[in-house]
Image (tube, helix red, strand yellow):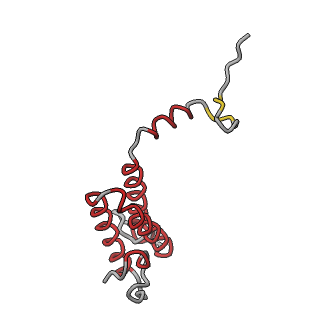
Amino acid sequence: MVSMSTTDETPAGIDAPVGADQATRDIAEVAAVEVITTAAVHLMSAAAVKCGLAEGDDAEELKDLDEARKLITALAALVVASAPDIGNQHARSLRDGLRSLQLAFREASVIPDEPGEGPGEKYTGSVV
């Protein structure tokens, strides 16, 4: 009798859900620049919401500058570290989005950071 398994054996000997091999093959086909820019866009979107830039009546309720600071700093690190590898065309648009978020954060802050102390500025330099 043949038993039907709901898992595939992974190279490390750990059972993985059926379809994991397909998912691995699918992600292997995606270029690194696409993975990096997708991650950056997710960070940007989350930071924008946390800066109070969401659309709708509840935008102010969703604002959380502490969380926005963390997201913008992570975005800055990703953009600066990956810029040489993703090319100027991609890096330029990511830097523009990052700068817009840094400025939006400054505008939303009741107590502004000193120049060079804002979110991500240790990676990007002062944004004023």
Left or right relative to 5: residue 30 = left
Image x and y of residue 97, in percent = 31, 66
The reply to whether residue 58 is in sight is no
Residue at x 36%, y 64% (from the top left corner): 54
- Front residue of this view, candidates 127 and 29: 29
Q: Is residue 91 above or below residue 51?
A: above
Residue at x 33%, y 63% (from the top left corner): 55
- Front residue of this view, candidates 27 and 67: 27
Q: Is residue 117 above or below residue 102?
A: below
State which quarter of the image contains the C terminus.
Answer: bottom left
Q: Residue furthest front?
A: 84
- Front residue of this view, candidates 44 and 96: 96
- Front residue of this view, candidates 39 and 103: 39
Q: Is residue 16 above or below residue 42?
A: above
Image x and y of residue 73, in percent = 45, 71
Q: Residue furthest top?
A: 1
Left or right relative to 102: residue 74 = right
Left or right relative to 69: residue 90 = left
Q: Is residue 29 above or below residue 62?
A: above
The image quarter containing residue 2 is: top right
The image quarter containing residue 105 is: bottom left
State which quarter of the image contains the N terminus.
Answer: top right
The reply to whether residue 12 is in sight is yes
Image x and y of residue 106, in percent = 37, 81
Tally of numbered discs: 0
Residue at x 42%, y 81% (from the top left corner): 118
Left or right relative to 59: residue 12 = right
Image x and y of residue 66, in percent = 50, 75
The image quarter containing residue 58 is: bottom left
Q: Residue furthest left?
A: 89
